[in-house]
Amino acid sequence: MAWRALHDAGAELVLSGHDHDYERFAPRDAAGRFDARGIRQFVVGTGGAYATPFLLPLRNSEMRDNSRIGVLRLVLKEGAYAWVFLEAAYEGFPNGNAPDRGEGKCH
């Protein structure tokens, strides 16, 4: 129900951290189907707790990683957004290592 309201309102992004992993999904409609004008979701629960194992691949998942801790840097632009996952390292945080990065256009 919340996803339908967000989709109908034209939301671009949803951020969640309920699992201890990193996962990025393609833009989806309220039923979870690919939709170029849909909502892109990031699951970023990579704060250092035990990793959650991935059991089954989920529809429209574009990137999955449960082997790193780090943060998601999200840059909001005029009509677009960019993301980069910054992995934590012993030498410093974040270390600039980017296992996932990309850009999207707003609708």
Image: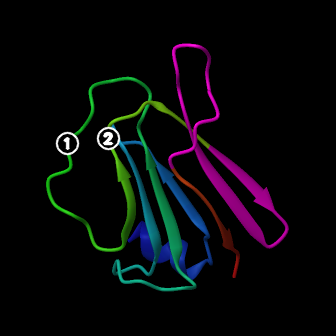
What residue type is disc 2 on?
Asn
Which mark is on residue 53?
1
In the image, 10 versus 77, the foreground residue is 77
Using the numbered discs, state the Cα–Cα distance from disc 1 to disc 2 in whole angstroms. 7 Å
Q: Residue furthest top?
A: 91
In the image, 74 versus 4, the foreground residue is 74
Q: Residue furthest right?
A: 78
> Mark 1 near mark 2, Cβ–Cβ under 8 Å?
yes
Against 99, is 24 above or below?
below
What residue type is disc 1 on?
Pro
Circle 1 packing at 10 Å, graded few (<14), some (14-19), many (20+), is few
Question: Pointer 2: what residue?
Answer: 66
Q: Position of residue 76 (x, y in %)?
A: 76, 57
**Magenta range:** 73-99
Against 58, is 83 above or below?
above
Numbered circles on residues, count: 2
Circle 2 sits in a helix, a strand or a loop, which is it? loop
Q: Does the magenta stretch include residue 75?
A: yes
- Pointer 1 or 2: first along the chain: 1
Query: Which of the 4 image quadrants contains residue 8?
Result: bottom right
In the image, 88 versus 6, the foreground residue is 88
